[in-house]
Image (tube, rainbow, N blue to C red):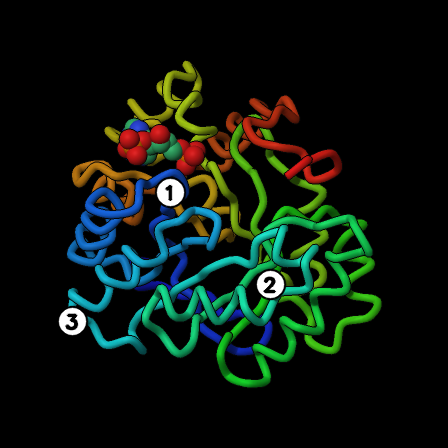
Amino acid sequence: MDLQTRIQLNNGVQMPVLGLGVFLSKDGEETYNAVRWALEAGYRHIDTAAVYGNEESVGRAIRDSGIPREELFVTTKLWNTRIRAHEEEQAFAESLRKLQMDYVDLYLIHWPVREEQGYVRAWSKMEAFNKQGRARAIGVSNYHVHHLQDLLAVADVPPALNQVECHPELTQVELSDFCREKGIAFEPWSPLGRGKLLENETLKDIAKAHGKTTAQVILRWGLQRGFVNIPKSVHKERIEQNAQLFDFALSQGEMERIFALNKNERVGSDPETFNF
Ligand code: A2P
């Protein structure tokens, strides 16, 4: 396994196991530089969202890199208000325009909008985008098992992936097992717990044993679980560090020590109660 390793999604599309996340990366120079550094470091996968407000910078950095589009994997996401307003087509067209692309590799419903069962209703629009070739794969984000069950009951195209909060204090064993069983790839967001896990003593101890950083240990744990990882950083040396995950392996015992840190504790909103 290396930085170019890809997993195969349930529709055959290949997705790099490591990408750069740009949540909370500021539009303009900050996001532009982060994407350029990541591409220079060998990343070929970028994860953004309409609501992050930085799709333009992502698109510009990709274009300026000169890397052929087909070598890259780009994800963006459909925002909640656009689902409630039945504006899925306009929202997707805007994202593609900002990214300067005629397709994305993966388009996700960002949150399971409850109103009018938006988390199920919007899926037919997603399927149309997929059939039109404007989204090579389609998936969801922040879906619990019951949201996925409702969706799977009516979907023509099953979701390729579920992106949810997941890190050593929220290990998501039940949800990730369900996804595996259904052929849905699993992608943690905030793998570092927004940075708060970096000082955890168990993780520091394991990191020391491997001559690695706590961030690398957490990301490696995700990789060994078979997940796609999208760490966010706007710092060049961290972006490079977060990709150096392929020259060491955690033992079964170390994996279990990390699982034991679970507290079912979130750093972000709960998909059952989010209010945005
Ligand atoms: P920054 O962008 O300033 O580098 P999460 O992915 O869990 O949301 O965590 C992201 C946070 O962790 C960001 O604040 C990011 O800050 C920081 N971060 C990312 N990679 C590293 C790293 N290798 N070492 C320390 N902090 C990191």
The secondary structure type at the circle numbered 3 is loop
Side of 22 relative to 149 (left or right): left
Q: Quadrant of ligand 1?
A: top left
User: Badge 1, how many Cα within 10 Å: few under 14, some, many 20+?
Assistant: many
Image location (x, y in percent) of residue 101:
35, 74
Q: Does 208 sit left or right of 49 as displayed? A: left
Label 3 to label 1: alpha-carbon separation: 23 Å
Instruction: Tell me the mark number nearer the camera, choosing from 3 and 1.
Output: 3
Instruction: Give the CA separation, mark 1 to mark 2.
Output: 19 Å
Beta carbon of the mark 1 residue lies under 8 A of ligand 1 = yes
Q: Amino acid at mark 3?
A: Gly
Q: Which of the labelled discs sits on residue 29, or is there none?
A: none
What kind of element bears circle 1? loop
Nearer-the-camera pick, 88 or 124: 88
* Residue 246 in picture, x, y percent from top left: 30, 49
Pointers 3 and 1 in contact (CB under 8 A)?
Answer: no
Q: In the shown orientation, is residue 260 left or right of residue 119?
A: left
Quarter of the image holding residue 64?
Answer: bottom left
**Residue bearing mark 2:** 139
Q: Are marks 3 and 2 in contact (CB under 8 Å)?
A: no
First reached walking from the N terminus: tag 1 or tag 2: 2
Q: Is residue 53 visible?
A: yes
The 10 Å Cα crowd at callout 3, few under 14, some 14 to 19, many 20 or more, is: few
Residue at the image position 70 percent from the left and 65 percent from the top: 122
Mark 3 highlights which residue? 66
Query: Of the residues shown, which amino acid type is indicated by label 2?
Result: Gly
